[in-house]
Image (cartoon, rainbow, N blue to C red):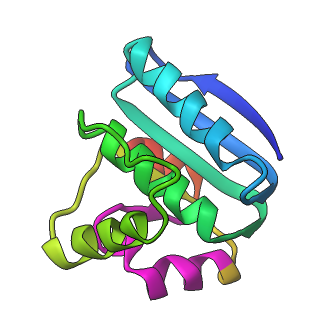
């Protein structure tokens, strides 16, 4: 997967993904998001418009970034099912977290976000500009 970063301001960035987000690269996505947070970014838009596939590891990466952008530590990537239970707990909470925003998912990825409940605690926008406008 190829990623590109567009710094919109000191505190806002867009991280675009091109390719497939899976077990081979999900930790790199988490690391990139954490690095941006360490540099002062407090609103991160994940541009999914060119993402072709997202595995369960990709879902863990997205949830981990949601935690980072809430000021919390992400789960241990080796925690296995605990990470999925954490996704479900956030989905069940009903609390929307605006600091991480998802933009332009394909129909397949949008369905996955819906079925896993991620779209219940992270806002999903039709395009990058809408996500930035929030």
Residue 22, horizontal then vertical, whole percent: 73, 60
Residue at the image point whose x is 74% and y is 46% from the top? 25
Residue 121 is covered by the magenta coloring: yes
Residue at the image point whose x is 24% and y is 67% from the top? 90
Residue 98 left/right relative to 9: left
Relative to 38, residue 130 above or below = below
In this rendered view, identify the residue nearer to me: 55 or 12: 55
Magenta-colored span: 109-126
Q: Which quarter of the figure has residue 69?
A: top left
Q: How many marks?
A: 0
What main secondary structure does the magenta stretch of the protein show?
Answer: helix
Residue 112, horizontal then vertical, whole percent: 57, 81
Residue 14 left/right relative to 119: right
Residue at the image point whose x is 37% and y is 79% from the top? 117
Residue at the image point whose x is 37% and y is 14% from the top? 40
Residue 87, horizontal then vertical, whole percent: 35, 68
Q: Which quarter of the figure has residue 12?
A: top left
């Amino acid at each position: 997967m190829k990623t590109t970063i567009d710094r919109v301001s000191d505190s806002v960035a867009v991280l675009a993904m091109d390719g497939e987000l899976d077990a081979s690269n999900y930790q790199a996505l988490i690391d990139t998001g954490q690095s941006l947070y360490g540099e002062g970014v407090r609103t991160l838009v994940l541009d999914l418009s060119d993402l072709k596939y997202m595995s369960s590891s990709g879902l863990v990466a997205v949830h981990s970034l949601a935690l980072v952008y809430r000021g919390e530590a992400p789960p241990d990537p080796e925690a296995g099912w605990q990470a999925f239970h954490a996704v479900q707990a956030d989905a069940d909470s009903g609390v929307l977290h605006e600091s991480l925003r998802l933009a332009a998912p394909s129909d397949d990825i949008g369905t996955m976000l819906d079925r896993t409940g991620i779209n219940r605690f992270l806002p999903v926008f039709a395009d990058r500009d809408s996500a930035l406008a929030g």
